Amino acid sequence: MSIAYLFVPGSSEKKIVKSFESDADVIIIDLEDSVKIDEKVEARQLVLNTIKDLPVNEKRTFLRVNATNTPWIKEDISLAHQVNLDGIMIPKVEEASDLIWAQKQTTLEIIPLIESARGIVNLKDIILASSTTKRIAFGSVDYALDIGAEWTAQGEERKNAMNNLVLLSRYYNLEPPVDAVYPDIHDKESLQRDANYGKQLGFFGKMVIHPKHIDWVKQVYQPSKEQIEWCQLVVQAYNDNKQDGAFQLDGKLIDLPIYMKAKRTLTMVTTQMADH
Ligand code: COA
Ligand code: MG
């Protein structure tokens, strides 16, 4: 499963090239907020020229197109097809009709970015309208702006929205949602605190703005060596003691949900090893 989704401005050839040398699980080439209005068309051309020499088939690569109510979206989507990307991320999705419209333009996977009160309140309809969506992503800075709250490192203002994203993703059998970028480039401790917050609420993976955030986020989501060893012990002990339903191991309760959680962690580790 993918953990680190690296954003890279579609207007920077150098950064696009660098992003493919990074350890990001997913690259998101951005045509939206990181590209100035008078450079949108130029950026598309730059992405086209740059990406043809890059290993887009070896790394999952998405294009963040401009929002559905902008004049750029149609050609942005065409570009994603032309360069054979894995999918598109659509920003500021607020209604089911945004996705219904987009799915008429493309069969590629769509990651809707939810970053407003309307997006949260209409989430159920948005999910029901998506046939090519596997997971949703959250934009915390735009969300705070939209609801008129102050964006905080602690994240109290976004907790309810994040709970909704997790709950509805689960209910409608999507993968867990992907957490928002952390806007401070250098502060490892608070970025990891924020990544842990999302993880505790039920998110999986995080978008990042800088290559050095990739490892920081992976450290949060990847189980440690000790956790893996513990999970192996739990699975072994459960298989040996199945007849008991519940029992203790080193003073801790082991029962079906704990066994299932341990198995899930081990499966994640194996899948990741297979991906590399
Ligand atoms: N992808 C790939 N490479 C990146 C990168 C990114 N997102 N961010 C920085 N780099 C590269 C830089 O080009 C630089 O390369 P160099 O050492 O060869 O010169 C190196 O990593 C160190 O970068 P640094 O000097 O610390 O940052 P910067 O001032 O060049 O860039 C930002 C800072 C914020 C402008 C940049 O990180 C960025 O563009 N982030 C993504 C923004 C974005 O896409 N926003 C939209 C979604 S929120
Ligand atoms: Mg934004």
Image (cartoon, helix red, strand yellow):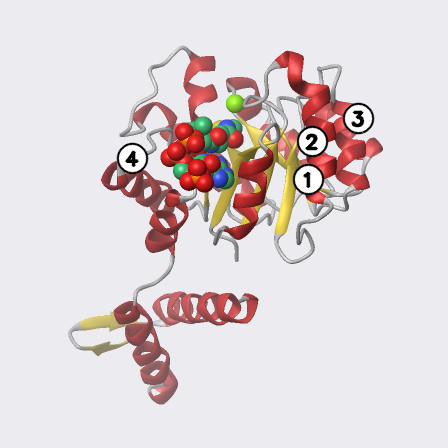
| Residue type highlighted by circle 1 | Thr
Give the amino acid at mark 2: Leu
- Helix, strand or loop for disc 4: loop
Q: CA distance from mark 4 to mark 3?
A: 35 Å
Reading the image, the residue beneath label 1 is 50
Q: Secondary structure under badge 2?
A: helix
User: Is the CB of mark 2 within 8 Å of ligand 1?
Assistant: no
Asked if the beta carbon under badge 3 is closer than 8 A to the nearest atom of ligand 1, the reply is: no
Question: Which percent across, then down, holds residue 120?
Answer: 53, 25
- Is 234 located above or below residue 145 in the figure? below
* 10 Å crowding of disc 4: few (<14), some (14-19), many (20+): few
Q: How many C-alpha atoms fall within 10 Å of the one at disc 3: few (<14), some, or many (≥20)?
A: some
- Determine the CA span between mark 4 and mark 2: 29 Å
Q: Earlier in the sequence, mark 4 or mark 3?
A: 3
Image location of residue 173, percent across then percent down = 60, 49
Q: Which residue is mark 4?
A: 186
Label 3 SS: helix
Number of residues whose C-alpha sits closer than 10 Å to that of mark 1, classed few (under 14), some (14–19) or many (20 or more): some
Amino acid identity at mark 4:
His
Q: Earlier in the sequence, mark 3 or mark 2?
A: 2
| Residues at marks 2 and 1, CA–CA distance in whole angstroms | 6 Å
The residue that disc 3 covers is 75
The correct choice, above or below, for 260 with respect to 143 in the image is: below
Q: Which residue is painted at 55% across and 37% down in the image?
A: 14
Residue matched to label 2: 46
Cα–Cα span, label 1 and label 3? 17 Å
Mark 1 C-beta closer than 8 Å to ligand 1: no
Residues at circles 4 and 3 in contact by the CB criterion of under 8 Å: no
Indicate whether 240 appears above or below 178: below
The answer to the question of whether label 2 and label 1 lie on touching residues, with beta carbons closer than 8 A, is: yes
